[in-house]
Image: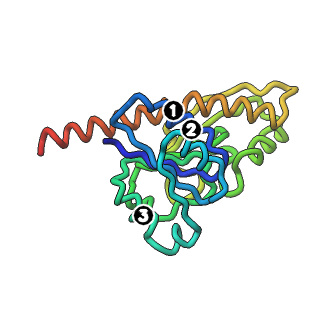
Amino acid sequence: MIQIAIFASGNGSNAAKIIEHFKLQKDVSFVVLSNNANAFVIERAKRLGVEVAVFEKNELYKTKSVLQFLECKEIDLIVLAGFMWLIPSNLVTAFPDKIVNIHPALLPKYGGKGMYGDNVHKAVIENKETNSGITIHLVNEKYDEGQVIFQEKVKIEPKDTAEILAHKIHALEHLYYPLIIEELIEEIRKKKNKKEKTS
């Protein structure tokens, strides 16, 4: 089995799209972790039959309980889907190049602390950019600075508001994030198969 942990803080539309994308792939299993006990992602995950774990700030930053949970589940890949907290160094070290995030702008522009969701779209519109898009990247110990895996652009029309841009960006996220995760999972499969053959 390939075990995927999805970290999410809010609505969970990306998490749901990812889980639904893999529902016919019987060797892919999910667990959803949230730092928000009231997040709608929890309801979405339960409807999709996926296990959910909720944790608090201290558990992530002051103890090893989240790391131990992930190790117990033998997690192969961590997917951030609207997760608002910085990933601590103990997770980055334990899962090198195995934590992936999606950002609703074309990094390195409009990245960093506080740059998420509507904050990003408002800044892009205010600066009269002609393009925005999504960036899928590996996660390191700083906000939005990990190695870029994939970017896709969308044109901004003069009449576009932050809300219109948000709809365009969500469409890109829902289309491309599952596909890029599929590519990452395929690499994990190859490595596991190779390991099994040599052991």
Name the element at disc 2.
helix
Q: Residue visible at 73% across and 25% down?
A: 155
Say which mark, if any, is on residue 20.
1
Residue located at (62% from left, 36% from top)? 134
Tell me which amino acid carries mark 1. Answer: Glu
Measured Cα–Cα span from mark 2 to mark 3: 23 Å
Give the crowd class for mark 3: few <14, some 14-19, many >=20 residues within 10 Å. some
Q: CA gap, disc 1 to disc 3?
A: 26 Å
For marks 1 and 2, give the CA distance. Answer: 6 Å
- The amino acid type found where label 3 is placed reads Leu
Locate residue 53, reporting x and y percent.
Answer: 51, 57
Three-letter code for the amino acid on which mark 2 is drawn? Ala
Q: Are marks 1 and 2 in contact (CB under 8 Å)?
A: yes
Number of marks drawn? 3
Circle 3 sits in a helix, a strand or a loop, which is it? helix
Question: How far from the left and from the top, in percent, is residue 188?
Answer: 32, 40
State the image quarter where residue 34 is shown.
bottom right
Q: Is residue 33 above or below residue 137?
A: below
**Which residue is nearer to you in this view: 65 or 188?**
65
Which label sits on residue 67? 3
| Mark closer to the chain start, 2 or 3 | 2
Tell me the quarter of the image containing the C terminus.
top left
From the viewer's perspective, is the residue at label 1 or at label 3 nearer? 1
Side (left or right) of 83 relative to 164: left
Percent position of residue 100, x then y: 49, 46
Q: Which mark is residue 107?
A: none
Q: How is the image coloured?
A: rainbow
Quadrant (top left/top right/bottom left/bottom right) for the N terminus: top left
Residue at numbered disc 2? 16
